[in-house]
Image: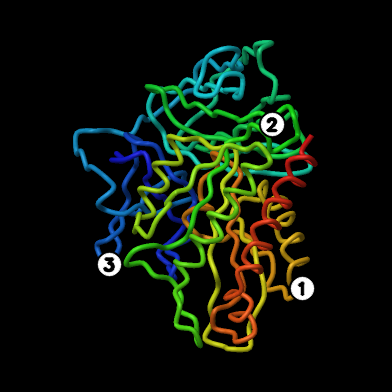
Amino acid sequence: MTRSKLTPLYYGLGTDRLGGARMETLDSAIVLRISGLDTTRRYWRVRLAPSLSAYVPVEQVQVDTLLRFPAHALTGSWRTWGDTTNGPIPGRFDYLSVALPARLPYRSRQEVDPNRIVLDIFGATSNTNWITQMRTTKGIKNVWFEQVADEQLRVYIELNQSTHWGYSVYYQRNALITRIRRRPDSGKLKGLLIAVDAGHGGSNTGARGEQSKRLEKEFTLDVAQKLKKELERSGALVVLTRSKDTNIGPTDRIRAMRQLLPDLLVSIHFNASGTASVRGFSTYYKHLGFRSLSQAVLQELLKVDPHEFGNVGHFNFFFNAPTDYPNVLVEGPFLSNPADENLILEERFRQNMAKAIRKGLKNWVKKSQ
């Protein structure tokens, strides 16, 4: 079974500088059916369904030879409800609970037009004849399911809102919970809790300017601090993942954000390339439901400087992986390009960059109503 609440489940053994392509991040104590060990002895191959396997790091799994994967994992009662005065943030979440005989593996994804969350539960067979839906549910419009294959139950959660504001999948005992964040009521930045991540820090210096030799970590922190002031002027509550030149690892940053549960997260970096002619702004997302956020921010950044590197999807950056809150990775211009580097060195440019990010966030929040 899985050891931690951040256990990565990979499609295959391929990798690059950002790691392998991740299918899901699993909760702890998930029962896995091991079907083999890869030749490097670094990953267990696990059987999710008769025609689907995935891989999990060896160190993330506790092997118990006495533990048996349930032969007939029948679903039990289903229920949806919404926060009223209780919960991590009162009045902000809806929930779907699916009762299971064990903590089975799963994967999830966002879909748009219509907006919905699709959840596959592996090893499960439907034995459900009703779904209890409480009137306190506001963000969930409809819930239904189908047995798409042996040992693969698919759950559809249709949303009653025009944008995705995030969701979390986790277990409470053997009940699989999907917690869905409702959109804010106001359509404004005021009152929202926004996390701003200054990329790199400490010994993790990031890229280096070709001419100035100044480091990416310096510029990311500067823009993050400027963005914090911009957002606070709009009435937002802002938390920086780092406020000084410290090296905070990816896992620690993710854990901190899971506890904080911000309404939005922006991670700020500057780009670099082995080809000096490459230049321009870019924004990145992993989950389809958050693409519109990354597009809104890029649109405003290109008003600061029109050179565009693009809007990059399904990006495997660690801060794009969470589904718990809308997130966007901003890559400023290239420190490896002379013209871009000259822009980055100007404080006015960095201030305008922060203003543009704030405008992009504001536009997206307003449009989400």
Mark 3: secondary structure: loop
In which quadrant will I find the N terminus? top left
What is the three-letter code of the residue carrying label 3?
Thr
Residues at marks 2 and 3, CA–CA distance in whole angstroms: 46 Å
Residue that appears at 61% across and 32% down = 155
| Marks 2 and 1, the one that precedes in the sequence | 2
Measuring from the top left, give residue 343's x and y in whole percent.
Answer: 64, 77
Name the foreground residue: 283 vs 126. 283
Identify whether 214 is placed above or below 227: below
In which quadrant will I find the C terminus? top right
Q: Which residue is mark 3?
A: 39
Measuring from the top left, give residue 274's x and y in whole percent.
Answer: 52, 86
Mark 1: secondary structure: loop
Residue that appears at 61% across and 30% down = 181
What is the three-letter code of the residue carrying label 2?
Arg
Name the foreground residue: 266 vs 202. 202
Q: Which residue is mark 2?
A: 183
| Marks 1 and 3, the one that precedes in the sequence | 3
Are discs 2 and 1 less than 8 Å apart at CB? no
Q: Which residue is mark 1?
A: 306
Identify whether 118 is placed above or below 90: below
Identify whether 121 is placed above or below 251: above
**From the viewer's perspective, is the residue at label 2 or at label 1 nearer?**
1
Mark 2: secondary structure: loop
Residues at marks 2 and 1, CA–CA distance in whole angstroms: 31 Å
Measuring from the top left, give residue 208's x and y in whole percent.
Answer: 45, 79
The residue carrying pointer 2 sits among few (fewer than 14), some (14 to 19) or many (20 or more) residues within 10 Å by Cα, namely many
What is the three-letter code of the residue carrying label 1?
Pro
Q: How is this picture coloured?
A: rainbow
